[in-house]
Amino acid sequence: MNCTLKRDADMNEVTNGASKSKRISKKPQYSRFTQQELPAWKPILTPGWVITSFLAIAFLFIPIGLVSLFASERVVEIVYRYDQDCVPEMYRGNVTAYIQNSLTNKTCIENITVPKRMDPPIFVYYQLDNFYQNHRRYVKSRSDKQLRSAAYEFSTKECEPEARLNKSRVSVPIVPCGLIAWSLFNDTYNLIMKDKVLDINKKGIAWKSDTKVKFGSNVYPKNFQSNDLIGGGKLNESIPLSEQEDLIVWMRTAALPTFRKLYGKINTSLEAHDTITVVLENNYNTYSFGGQKKLVLSTTSWIGGKNDFLGIAYLTVGGICLFMALNFILLYVFKPRPLGDPSYLSWNRKAVN
Amino acid sequence: MADVGIGISGQEGRQAVMASDFAMGQFRFLVPLLLVHGHWNYQRMGYMILYNFYRNAVFVLVLFWYVLFTGFTLTTAITEWSSVLYSVLYTSVPTIVIAILDKDLSRRSLLTYPQLYGDGQRQESYSSTLFWLTIADTLWQSIVVFYVPFFAYWKSDIDGSSLGDLWTLTVVFLVNIHLAMDVIRWTWISDASIWGSIIATCICVIIIDVIPMLPGYWAIFDLVSKGSFWICLLGIQIAALFPRFGIKMFIQHCKPSDIQIAREADKFGNSMELTGQEIEMNPSRR
């Protein structure tokens, strides 16, 4: 076909001598993109670049690791596990019955010592171990529409089984519905130091975005914790949800099974070797599933709470990269290979051998 | 190795063309078809297959590791919207662009030295060994991506949506930077697709976290205010990629492939001749 057309074109040129006719060609329009000839950068990592990159990583990571480790070491943290100690002697055989009985005395008084000086703001957390707030059914069991606005009171479909209450044969919605709200943590802590109550500020512990947007200021708790099974704390029905900061903090479901949640902030400093008396109400049932409860007082730094992991990880990676840089230097010195040397090509090597 | 049928359309008609996979006009076009396009196609296909396995497996393995810590209840570490957009928007465009446009050697070198075609015959771009090495690398990278934030936030008050955002951003950055490490020829389109995908991911994650109806509302803004987020993000990229980088550079130095030598010769202007002159079957245009 190509040959035929070309002959026709040639004949056109011969017969129409005066006018130059267009060559009929099947060649596509040339463009740098379709011919894959776009201007390009073709980097090749030479030995110099390899060593430079490893050294650069080492010189970046080792200081960052040291800074992170230093920041984490500066954080002062008191972790006090109280769920075992706070059960009175006579109930230790049947802890679940003790915790579920609303008549038993749940008040517990313990002493903790401050190991080092702690500067304000000092954060008071409660830590739960082996509590899977990231369980799939649990995470889904909430209604964000209902939390936002009173108009969506009845959208409780996702919240089963804590969605509706049968009150005198009428089904009324539970606000806030769902298992997350139902299992609200309800231990309380009061701290006393040198016979003075340490003021724990419980305002401003939830995210501002949650209090302003996610939880409506016209939504009030209704029919909450009124079923047979009590899962956790009760809510004050006259305070709107946007001000129930404990609930808001609890409803930000934790990512991992061992987690802390903010209880409050202390704005006075604590000196080393101070003794703090903790008066706590041990209400929450973590005994039936082998969970643990801990009270945590901690300062913070730019890296967060006390966690040496990032510092150590950075130092490790920086150290390994330094080691690899040295190895590559030795490799390039003792076993050099000139770049682009044709004697290394497979067909030339066979010829040489 | 592929067997393809090539038909030449000519004066005898187009019957061969109908039955073939590729059709040409002239017999001499067979040389560039094989040596140039055949070689490029093999190298691109081989790399793209390995990269696609890696890209999808690393994402799924992060979800897998998380399941071990949710009581085996299949809570997704990464929000559903980001999971869907991962394959559609966050990482698909660079894959396609690099698979189409990346060239390891110029047309001229490939035509001048037909022995370079042997790379495909020796299965140097895709083989069972390379596949299992890729899977081992994928496993390592997924472990780094999952466990670094895991240990960094183990006893902290981070919530599920923030940690999910961290994992999303880390995986997308990692997968794109891994691709960037392997790109041989950087055109403006490669730059735009790789860095553009990363920027698009950040924008999409922000948009998803601005919808009040979703439980993860505002999580990304709370997350970026933590110093530990930035430390994790940087550390994970380097820690996941440096073994691959080291091994690749080591092999490049000690056991260079023909393609590597040819690229270096092209760049540094060495002649590739050692013994005698090969006769060109098809004189190149330039």
Image (cartoon, helix red, strand yellow):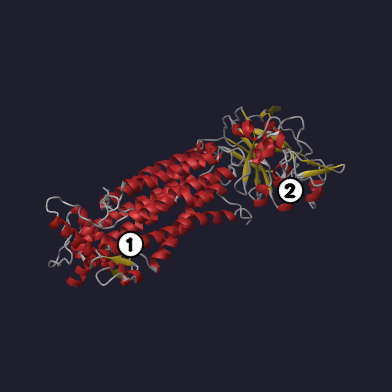
Tell me the quarter of the image containing the N terminus of chain B: bottom left
Q: Secondary structure at mark 1?
A: helix
CB-based contact (under 8 Å), mark 1 and mark 2: no
Front in this rendered view, residue A18 or A300? A18
Tell me the quarter of the image containing the C terminus of chain B: bottom left
Percent x, y of residue A274: 63, 32
Percent x, y of residue A285: 74, 46
Q: Is residue B280 above or below residue A299?
A: below
Q: Note whether residue A153 is visible.
A: yes
Looking at the image, residue A99 sits to the left or right of residue A278; the answer is right
Residue denoted by label 1: B41
Front in this rendered view, residue A34 or A335? A34
The crowd level at tag 1 (other Cα within 10 Å; few <14, some 14-19, many 20+) is some
| Quarter-of-image position of residue A278 | top right
The crowd level at tag 2 (other Cα within 10 Å; few <14, some 14-19, many 20+) is some
Amino acid type of the residue tagged 1 in the rendering: Asn
Q: Note whether residue B245 is visible.
A: no
Q: Is residue A162 above or below residue B35?
A: above
Looking at the image, residue A312 sits to the left or right of residue A353; the answer is right
Looking at the image, residue A109 sits to the left or right of residue B83; the answer is right
Amino acid type of the residue tagged 2 in the rendering: Glu
Indicate the chain on which mark 1 is placed: B
Residue denoted by label 2: A160
Q: Is residue B93 above or below residue A6?
A: above
